[in-house]
Amino acid sequence: MPKRKQIPKKIRTKILLWCSRHCCLCGKQCSTNIEIHHIDKNHNNNDIDNLIPLCFDCHSEIERYNSSHPKGNNYRTEEIKSRREQIYDLHTLKYIRDVSIKISNMVEGMELKRPLGDVSCTVQSHSKDIPIRLILKVEPFLNGQPVENNIHKLYLGEIRWNLNPSTIVCGHFEFPINESAQPFLYQIVINYSIIDCFEREHKMLPFSYVWDDPQKGDWWFHPTDELLKKLRTSPTFFQK
Ligand SMILES: [Zn+2]
């Protein structure tokens, strides 16, 4: 029989820290009485998303379940994974801090407008104590359609930002603007995650900034990632 692949030590350590050695189904503290279950039952698939730390009881219950003679309701994969995320959150949310991300046409803190196609992005960590990492991904759209761009990879989720407590980064990125576009409705969708000191990624909800006047005005906050094709749905709605 082919030998089972061992779970890499680094992954094992991470997930045991994330659950603080609590069973990810019943939630009990296990200390050394903890095992790592492969959710898809393939013992060579050591992808971190396929693993779940369990106490002896929950592990044997899950392994014993016979789907041809079902008794009770076994856990479905999505439920097992969501339950695991709940337990990881319970033990790791204390290691993340707020980050604010603001888009503007103005240079942060100055009455100075940036040239067209150059957008300010101010990122601030509100942590007073611990360092955190950030993955930031911005996506530009014009009238609800994706726009080709040359945005730096720092803003495309390809590089992690290291944010020490109280850090403010006043950055900017190139943004393709087509002034003759009619209608003119630019939208930047912002996706971001915060990574804690134990390497767990906490995904935040996406939101966006919108700009609809090529001559003046500034980007304004829009609390969803829903794409906008036009701003004013009727002549009177949304009028300034
Ligand atoms: Zn358990």
Image: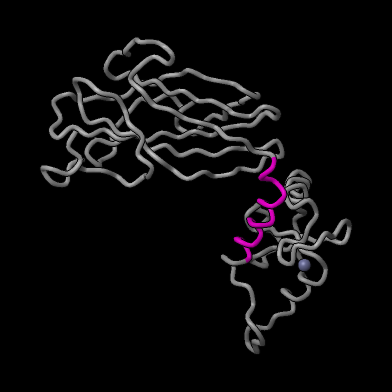
Residue 173's place in the image compared with 3, above or below, is above
State whether the magenta stretch is mostly helix, strand or loop.
Answer: helix
Specify whether 126 is left or right of 28: left
Q: Residue furthest right?
A: 32
Residue 17: x and y in percent read: 77, 47
Relative image position of residue 88 (x, y in whole percent) = 68, 52
Q: Quadrant of residue 3?
A: bottom right
Q: Position of residue 156 (x, y in %)?
A: 45, 32
Quadrant where the N terminus is found in the figure: bottom right
- When the figure is inspected, residue 4 is found, relative to residue 205, above or below; the finding is below
- Residue range in magenta is 80-94
Figure check: 235 above or below 128: below
- Residue depicted at x 20% and y 40%: 238
Q: Is residue 232 left or right of residue 6?
A: left
Q: Which residue sits at x=70%, y=80%?
A: 65
Residue farthest along the bottom direction in this orientation: 69
Is residue 90 a member of the stretch shown in magenta? yes
Q: Residue 172's x, y, as percent?
A: 41, 19
The quadrant of the rendering that contains the C terminus is top left
- Establish if 111 lies above or below 149: above
Residue found 38% across the figure and 42% down from its top: 223
Q: How many marks?
A: 0
**Is 163 part of what is drawn in magenta?**
no
**Taking the image as four quarters, which one is ligand 1 found in?**
bottom right
Query: Which is nearer the eye, 98 or 169?
Result: 98
The answer to which image quadrant residue 53 occupies is bottom right
Image side of residue 25 versus residue 153, left or right: right
Q: Residue at x 52, y 19 (%)?
A: 169
